[in-house]
Image (cartoon, helix red, strand yellow):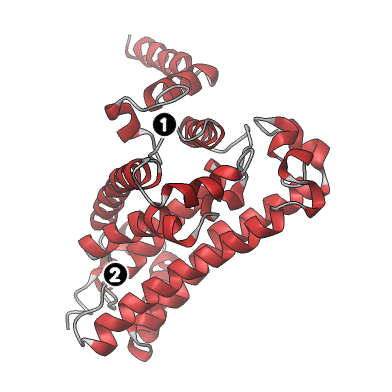
Amino acid sequence: MDAFLSIPALSFLLIPTFSSWSTSLNLLFFYLTWSTLIISNPPWKVELLGTLAVRLLFYTLPSLGFLLFDSAVPSVAASIKEHGDVALPLSDEQGGKKGRWWKVALGSTGNVLLGVALQLAIEYAFTEIFHIRSALRVSTTLPMPWGIAKDLFRGLLLREILTYTLHRYALHSPNSSLTPYHAAWQHALPAPYSLAAHYDHPLPYLLHVFFPTYLPALLFRFHILTYHMYLAVVSVEETFAYSGYNVLPSGLILGGMARRQESHLMGGGRGNYGCWGLCDFMAGTSVGGDVVEDVSDEAEKRGVVEKVKGKSRGAAKRRK
């Protein structure tokens, strides 16, 4: 009965009022497929398959694709890299064809699998060993749109805070035993490219990438579908922010994030410890421009202000 009164059941009554029957049928088929998946598989298996799929589709495959592109047409790739040839995986600065690119690829992929394995271990321990509820909500009831938006907002915000705190004080403090590992791995790269997002010694990686990403979902107990959306957003951010390209989609956000990551990695880790730049802005640790300046510069470059003013003037004329 609870499943019937959930969003999918109600949507089949309400959606036809506003859209075609095909939309309702698609939702019905999705709900039936989803319910079958949940009923026929343990929570840890659903979480494992979904997490692997998201990481593969939104991070690993695109990053390997960028690596192939940078290697196959280096002259074209260098022309759209912020730092030119230095940011190419097979450049002389990176060690050439016999350099560390393959170590970065293996290390990055290995860390992704390490994170998935640790997440699986936590879920398996919750459900199969301690016999308590799953770490994430795995149920046939689908999340409400407002609930998804709320979880995404607070999840990304907490991730920013955790990333900033752990990155600054655990990986860039002279008193931390993890600082040399982080410096010898990720900060050994002359310039970033997408695979560098997950390239690090396993211990710094878990502190810097895995825990800030997973703990908000665990704390707020995201629905598994919300978690996969959240993980897709994080994966796309990592892929482009570390790509080294100066031509990025949604440049108002990703362009500034990419510049801050480059400044951090190529500047010896003197600042820009967060993902989005919010904590750096508030703590005064931004390097090479803060998040507000980045948004303003990108808006000016793209003529956003002029377009808004033009639309406002057009609306005023129509009212007259």
Residue 253 rendering spot, x and y as whole percentages = 46, 34
Q: Is residue 278 above or below residue 159?
A: above
Secondary structure under tag 1 reads loop
Residue 208 rendering spot, x and y as whole percentages = 40, 52
Residue 153 rendering spot, x and y as whole percentages = 28, 47
Number of numbered callouts drawn: 2
- What residue does disc 2 label? 142
Secondary structure under tag 2 reads loop
The answer to which image quadrant residue 64 occupies is bottom right
Q: Dot 1: few (<14), some (14–19), or many (≥20) neighbours within 10 Å?
A: many
In this rendering, position of residue 29 left or right of residue 239: left
Give the residue type at disc 1: Gly
Mark 2 or mark 1, earlier in chain: 2
In this rendering, position of residue 259 left or right of residue 75: left
- What residue does disc 1 label? 271
Q: Is residue 307 above or below residue 164?
A: above
Residue 32 appearing in the image: no
Q: Dot 2: few (<14), some (14–19), or many (≥20) neighbours within 10 Å?
A: many
Q: Are marks 2 and 1 in contact (CB under 8 Å)?
A: no
Q: Nearer the viewer, mark 2 or mark 1?
A: 1
Q: Quadrant of the N terminus?
A: bottom left
Residue shown at 79%/40% (left/top)? 92
> Closest to the observer: 218 or 268?
268
Residue shown at 31%/78% (left/top)? 123
Give the residue type at disc 2: Leu
Residue shown at 63%/33% (left/top)? 247
Q: State how far apart marks 2 and 1 are (Cα).
A: 40 Å
Residue 164 rendering spot, x and y as whole percentages = 33, 42
Q: Quadrant of the C terminus?
A: top left
